[in-house]
């Protein structure tokens, strides 16, 4: 059989995969800062109220709602000598430079309008990098298990790179600390340098697979609706939203919880994110290996159960005990690392299904949907959790006195809200039908169609009298 598949089924060599995976680092650097350190920075140092920050970030999500879908649609339609998705990934870099500089260097009289303007540009940069890299990765392999391996390494390398932020207190002898407001401008410059190197390495190391030839001359409204009505994709979007919303609810109050409830100083607060991130480096490839045996959706559900258990254990550890907390953070991060890896790999499988059914490539739009849920989940967490902290009269400023009731409300928000949300996300995958066996059937059907299209194109060029089989060989 002639294979002209745009998504080869072979195994990518590890050195090339590692170089390609460096492209995940900028997004993970932004995730950590946007979710964990920047909201407390604007609430504490810059003096914006918790409710105002929550509402502003919620409004950002509404304004940004169509950006990811528009970017995904444009990416799918793009045709350049270097690919569909790689140019967009590369173009996200200058957008990142401008937005990071403005967000990490606010003026003394900063207000919510400034925060809204530059935060939304930073989210655009994030979308271009994540969508471009994820859809590009999906085009590199059509194999069910190879996709788990690829996205596992992408998360692992991304988390490894972002862990440099958590290690800064150790590397700089406490001169640069993400939890210290005075370090935020310097960290912005560090992010710009690391992101530039990572994007260039990924762009130069890996070619993008040739775009599949559309089997239809015109795309109908029904074809677009298929993206939003596909049962497997609907389950993935719902699961992804809650699986992101759960950990996202704890991220913006991480600094407050470990500073005011667990009684760690700002340097140790950052250091405790090292095992949390390192767990992703180890966990992502291991969860991918487990998924090869049990299937991706079942593995996500197992990880969700593990997350609930490890979050409960973290709450039970007495305040101030560094090493037990260190180990507990590792176990929480280990379970969490399964979610993004496997959901993204499952989206690539849905892209194959839709290409078989509609004849059109829709990877860009599909990854736009899960990128949207990721941003929506993380922002909704701030929108919901910060006003709750205001209601219990929690004071976010360093050194402020907080009542027992305020600290209890903070603890409940950090530990138990994420458990409930992750449990709902895991339940969304009950009955998921796009298994390894079904995806293998889809890939075989796609390869047969592409082989027929290729043979037909040769016949059109060479004439009906040519020996097509000989020409193809």
Image: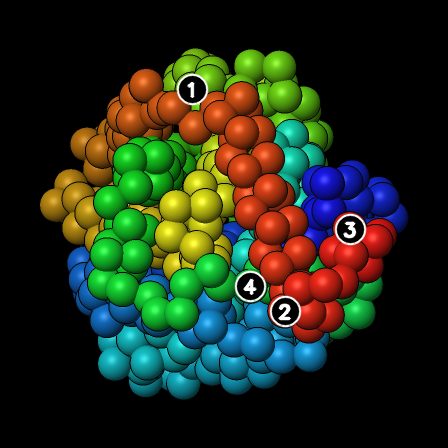
- Say left or right for 316 vs 169: left
Q: Quadrant of the N terminus?
A: top right
- Upstream in sequence: badge 1 or badge 3: 1
Residue with the mark numbered 2: 460
Which label was assigned to residue 213? 4
Q: Which residue: 71% across, 47% down? A: 3
Q: CA distance from mark 3 to mark 2?
A: 14 Å
Residue found at the far front of this picture: 465
Reply above or below: 467 against 409.
Answer: below
Residue with the mark numbered 1: 301
- Upstream in sequence: badge 4 or badge 1: 4
- Say left or right for 171 vs 249: right
Mark 3 touching mark 4, by CB under 8 A? no
Give x and y (percent) for residue 250.
37, 39
Q: CA distance from mark 3 to mark 4?
A: 20 Å
Circle 1 or circle 3, nearest the eye: 3
- Say left or right for 418 vs 82: left
């Amino acid at each position: 059989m002639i294979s002209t598949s745009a998504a080869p089924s072979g195994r990518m060599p590890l050195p090339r995969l590692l170089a390609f995976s460096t492209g995940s680092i900028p997004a993970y650097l932004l995730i950590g800062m946007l979710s964990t350190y920047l909201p407390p920075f604007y609430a504490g140092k810059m003096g914006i109220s918790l409710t105002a920050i929550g509402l502003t970030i919620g409004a950002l999500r509404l304004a940004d709602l169509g950006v990811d879908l528009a970017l995904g649609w444009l990416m799918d339609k793009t045709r350049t000598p270097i690919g569909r998705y790689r140019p967009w990934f590369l173009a996200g870099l200058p957008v990142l430079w401008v937005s990071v500089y403005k967000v990490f260097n606010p003026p003394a009289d900063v207000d919510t309008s400034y925060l809204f303007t530059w935060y939304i540009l930073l989210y655009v940069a994030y979308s271009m990098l994540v969508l471009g890299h994820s859809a590009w990765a999906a085009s590199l392999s059509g194999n069910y298990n190879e996709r788990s391996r690829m996205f596992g390494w992408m998360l692992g390398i991304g988390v490894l790179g972002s862990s440099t932020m958590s290690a800064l207190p150790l590397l700089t002898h406490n001169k640069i600390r993400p939890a210290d407001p005075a370090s935020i401008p310097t960290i912005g410059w560090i992010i710009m340098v690391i992101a530039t190197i990572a994007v260039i390495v990924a762009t130069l190391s890996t070619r993008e697979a040739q775009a599949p030839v559309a089997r239809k001359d015109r795309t109908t409204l029904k074809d677009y609706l298929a993206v939003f009505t596909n049962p497997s994709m609907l389950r993935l979007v719902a699961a992804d939203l809650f699986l992101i919303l759960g950990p996202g609810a704890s991220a913006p109050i991480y600094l407050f919880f470990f500073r005011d409830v667990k009684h760690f100083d700002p340097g140790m607060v950052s250091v405790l994110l090292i095992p949390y991130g390192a767990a992703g480096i180890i966990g992502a490839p291991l969860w991918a290996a487990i998924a090869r045996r049990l299937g991706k959706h079942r593995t996500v559900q197992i990880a969700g159960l593990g997350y609930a258990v490890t979050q409960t254990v973290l709450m039970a550890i007495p305040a101030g005990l560094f090493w037990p907390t260190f180990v507990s953070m590792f176990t929480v991060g280990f379970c969490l690392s399964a979610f993004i890896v496997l959901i993204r790999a499952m989206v690539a499988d849905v892209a194959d299904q839709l290409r078989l059914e509609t004849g059109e490539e829709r990877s860009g739009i599909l990854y736009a949907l899960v990128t949207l849920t990721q941003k929506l989940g993380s922002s909704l967490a701030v929108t919901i959790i910060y006003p709750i902290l205001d209601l219990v009269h929690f004071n976010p400023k360093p050194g402020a006195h907080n009542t027992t009731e305020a600290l209890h409300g903070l603890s409940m928000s950090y530990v138990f809200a994420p458990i409930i949300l992750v449990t709902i996300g895991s339940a969304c995958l009950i009955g998921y039908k796009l298994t390894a066996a079904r995806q293998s059937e889809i890939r075989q059907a796609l390869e047969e169609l592409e082989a027929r299209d290729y043979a037909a194109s040769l016949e059109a060029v060479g004439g009906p009298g040519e020996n097509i089989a000989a020409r193809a060989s």
